Image (tube, rainbow, N blue to C red):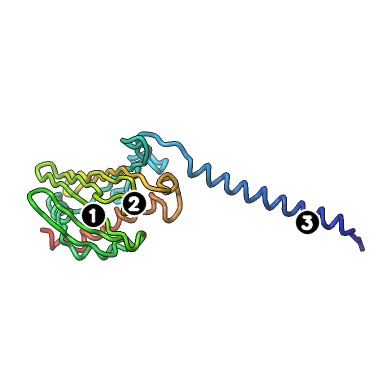
Amino acid sequence: MICRSSSDMGTVQYQKQSNAVVYIRSCVCALVLIASTGFSSERPVSDLPQDQYSYNDPIISKLKPERARGRGFKLEFSVDAPLGVFWNYKTNFDNDLLHKNKYITSHKLVSYKDNLVITETEYSYKPGDVFNWQTTIYPDRNLLEYELLNPEECGQKYHYGYIQLEAEGEGTHVTHVAYFDFFGASFWVNYPFKGGMSDFLKYTAHWEQQFVLEFEHQYQ
């Protein structure tokens, strides 16, 4: 039997605490390293070459901000629906079916005049905040340009972008570009797990791919 003095036991306990602190610091440093990965002007999130993506897999790229601060992304994916069908879906702003998206709590068409549309949307991740979006429609180019009209009320400095649709055989190729700035944007963009930008955008792409197939008959 080995007896330890109180001083020896205190030393052992101190060493264990020190080791725990070192371990926690190492974990924090690892997360910071992941979150602070440098941006390229257009860098795919996955290391796979783009030609290895299947038809339904989205391609997500991180973009440098157009302004002094902020972040951006480019989301590209294909939809198994004709260009005209998907364009009708994207320009149906008075659409109650959008509530089927788990991130959308409510959606309301405020005004639609000429090629300018104003909508109000509430999101599950920002309860209580109403996002006022202005969308400009360019039918001849299959292009939608949008901007958040009340960024300060929604905890943002700015948020704008565009959605470009192009025919791709019998389907549609979607390019969605966004630029934004809000507290924690850098961490959200680089966070590789559930709840990060990549996870959110993959859900968005897969939801639209599935949604338009289920309700294609409504947009013929």
Horizontal relation, residue 10 to residue 197: left or right: right
Q: Look at the picture and state if 98 lies above or below 70.
A: below
Residue at (18, 49) in percent of width and height: 135
The residue tagged with tag 1: helix, strand or loop?
Answer: strand
Q: CA distance from mark 2 to mark 3?
A: 46 Å
Where residue 74 sits, quadrant-wise, is top left
Residue at (78, 56) in percent of width and height: 13
Q: Look at the picture and state if 101 lies above or below 166.
A: below
Nearer to us of marks 2 and 1 is 1
The tag earlier along the polypeptide, 2 or 3, is 3
Foreground of the two, 55 or 121:
121
Residue 13: which disc? 3
Residue at (21, 47) in percent of width and height: 146
**Residue flagged by tag 1: what amino acid is it?**
Asn
Q: Which residue is mark 1?
A: 132
**Residue flagged by tag 3: what amino acid is it?**
Gln
Q: CA distance from mark 2 to mark 1?
A: 21 Å
From the top left corner, tell me how far across and down residue 34 is, in percent: 50, 44
**Residue flagged by tag 2: what amino acid is it?**
Leu
Foreground of the two, 111 or 97:
111
Q: CA distance from mark 3 to mark 1?
A: 57 Å
The residue tagged with tag 3: helix, strand or loop?
Answer: helix
Q: Residue farthest to the front?
A: 152
Residue 201: which disc? 2
The residue tagged with tag 2: helix, strand or loop?
Answer: helix
Quarter that holds the N terminus: bottom right
Q: Are marks 2 and 3 in contact (CB under 8 Å)?
A: no
